[in-house]
Amino acid sequence: MPESTESAPAPAAAAPRPAPRAGGLGQGPGRLLVTLYGVFTVAAASRSIYQLIAQYEEAPLAYVLSAVSAAVYAFITLSLVRGGEGARKAAVVCCAAELIGVLTVGTWTLLDRSAFPDETVWSDYGMGYLFIPIFLPVTGLIWLRKARRES
């Protein structure tokens, strides 16, 4: 058989990912936010998974809310790590939702203890977690606003 002089088409090159910029969302003070959100993701997720499996009947609302908080924390962590304007906007929306959640659940737990027979991450504005859950979204929103001005 004669050899073909045509060469096989070159495989399509993957689009290069832009290098993270200095001063990105996860740089400088953003690293502390990434760390705290990462820790809270693991803490809230592991606690809620156990409670949903082993204790669901005792306080389903509290355990589902803890799982929701874990998902919010995870999304914010990934957005901060990813960086870029789209990720920053998504993180702003999630931080605002997180703050609304903390304020709503925190107030609800103070007004109606019977609705929460067991604590959530956001109970009493995060008192069981040294009030970090109330300060985290506020700090995140401030950082994300500052990051927008610097980009």
Image (cartoon, helix red, strand yellow):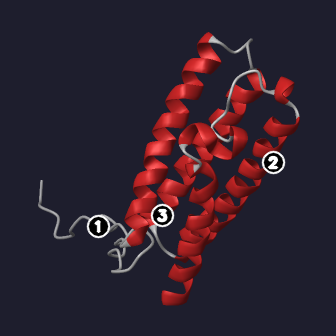
At a point 43% along the width and 58% down the height, the residue shown is: 34
Q: Position of residue 18 (x, y in %)?
A: 36, 76
* Residue type beneath disc 1: Pro
Q: Position of residue 85 (x, y in %)?
A: 55, 77
Q: Which mark is residue 9?
A: 1
Q: State which quadrant residue 89 falls in.
A: bottom right
Question: Which of these two is toward me, 61 or 105?
Answer: 105
- Mark 3 nearby-residue class (10 Å; few <14, some 14–19, many ≥20): many
Tell me the residue that label 3 is attached to: 80
Q: Which mark is residue 92?
A: none
* Residue type beneath disc 2: Thr
Residue extending farthest to the left is 2
Mark 3 or mark 1: which is in front? Answer: 3
- Position of 145 compared to 78: left or right? right
Which secondary structure, mark 3? helix
Tell me the residue that label 2 is attached to: 104
Which secondary structure, mark 1? loop
- Mark 2 nearby-residue class (10 Å; few <14, some 14–19, many ≥20): some
Question: Which of these two is toward me, 113 or 3?
Answer: 113
Image label count: 3
Mark 3 or mark 2: which is in front? Answer: 2
Residue 60 in the image: above or below residue 42: above
- Mark 1 nearby-residue class (10 Å; few <14, some 14–19, many ≥20): few
Earlier sequence position, callout 3 versus callout 2: 3
Residue 113 in the image: above or below residue 5: above
At a point 59% along the width and 48% down the height, the residue shown is: 131
Could you give the CA–CA distance between mark 3 and mark 2, rounded to whole angstroms? Answer: 25 Å
Q: Position of residue 7 (x, y in %)?
A: 20, 68
At a point 67% along the width and 33% down the height, the residue shown is: 120
